[in-house]
Amino acid sequence: SSFINALLQEERLLVDEQRGTTYDPVAVQWYFKDHEFVLIDTAGITRAGSHPNDESHGDMKSSFRAIQRSHACVLVVDPLPGMEAGVTQAPSRWDFRVARMVLEEGKILVLAINKWDLVPDMDQERYREELLKNVTEQLPEVRDLPVIFVSAKHAQNVANVMVKVMQLYKRWNARIPTGKLNDWMRAFMLHWPPPWKDGQKCYPKYITQVNNRPPTFAMWTNLYGEMPPNYLRHIANTMRTEFNIQGIPVRLKLRTTLMPKPGKKLTKKEVRQWKRMGPKQAEAMAKLGKRRIYRRSKVGGDRAPSLEDQEKLAREVTFNG
């Protein structure tokens, strides 16, 4: 609430030193640099039972719904806990859990370290390095996640948070041409070829962007298989640097060029051959059979799964980076 009041430069929302003042999300219309914003002040998201009076923290579900409806989320973090002992505990494990939930939803995330004016000047540099190190280690899936140190009480550096949100919003809506993506992918494979996994080498053949908000890419490979998560994370981070989309979540969907053409009639020999393509290929066939996606046609013979069924299968190997 104090952060939004600092942006509005007026006491629009009720602020109190005691936690739990905000019960339900409060929306405020606001204009910044000729752009319209809707600022939503949510109830604090805390673990159940972490405070003496849980009822004072309002409806947590409404806060999660506000995150799902939003475009960008500013996670305000209190850095003071633990500083008396000379070590900062911020962001806490619960703060990182909320941050991961925002990233899994594909939303823009900015960390605002509040009450920075209460940190002694001689200790600010040391605490700043510790905070940035914690963020880098706990959230490796997003490189260059913006962390801004503010003071809502004195309205220090709060405008920079919204400037950063506007920059990330442009990247969040970015569209990358398919030709540039494939040129970059070929150069990437020369420097960092994919590793072997489960007795096979899943090699990318084609990549294209299928959606934005957040940028989502479909990558066709020679086999139906999963790449190691650290290799997919390396692809996503390198892509962020190459196409200037740092600080936002990126999604990669793995698909295979070995999938039969939808509706094509397959012989028993072709079905057996498809099963023998590798360990992951046999696993894919088992999943298809278990879900009854690969079904018998009325006229006899087997038919390949439809596009809708292939989409269901492709969603099982989606990487959120």
Image (spheres, grey):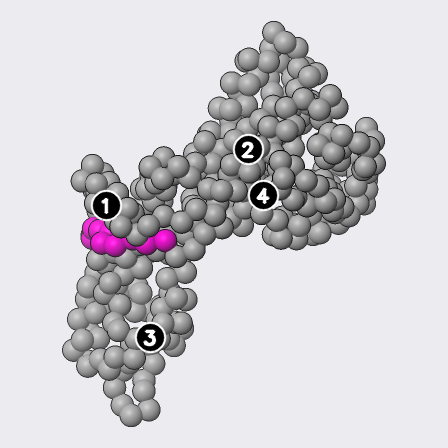
Which residue ends up furthest to the top in the rendered image? Answer: 122
Q: Secondary structure at mark 4?
A: strand
Q: Is residue 252 left or right of residue 9?
A: left
In the rendered structure, which disc, 3 or 4, sits on the residue that comes first in sequence?
Answer: 4
Q: With respect to residue 166, does 311 lie above or below?
A: below
Amino acid at the residue labelled 4 = Ala
Q: Residue at x 81, y 37 (%)?
A: 12
Q: Confirm whether residue 146 shows in the render.
A: yes
| Residue position marked by numbered label 1 in the rendering | 183
Amino acid at the residue labelled 1 = Asp
| Marks 3, 4: nearer the viewer | 4
In the rendered structure, which disc, 1 or 3, sits on the residue that comes first in sequence?
Answer: 1
Give the image location of residue 69, x and y in percent.
62, 53
| Residue position marked by numbered label 3 in the rendering | 305
Which numbered tag is attached to residue 164?
A: 2
Q: With respect to residue 139, does 274 lie above or below?
A: below
Q: Main secondary structure of the magenta part?
A: strand
Amino acid at the residue labelled 2 = Lys
In the rendered structure, which disc, 1 or 4, sits on the residue that comes first in sequence?
Answer: 4
| Marks 2, 4: nearer the viewer | 2
Amino acid at the residue labelled 3 = Pro
Q: CA distance from mark 1 to mark 3?
A: 31 Å
* Label 2 crowd (10 A; few <14 / some 14-19 / many >=20): some
Q: Secondary structure at mark 1?
A: helix
| Residue position marked by numbered label 4 in the rendering | 72
Which residue ends up furthest to the front in the rendered image? Answer: 34
Cβ–Cβ below 8 Å for labels 2 and 3? no
In the rendered structure, which disc, 1 or 2, sits on the residue that comes first in sequence?
Answer: 2
Q: Residue at x 25, y 54 (%)?
A: 206
Q: Is residue 9 left or right of residue 146?
A: right
Residue numbers of the magenta segment: 199-209
Q: CA distance from mark 2 to mark 3?
A: 45 Å
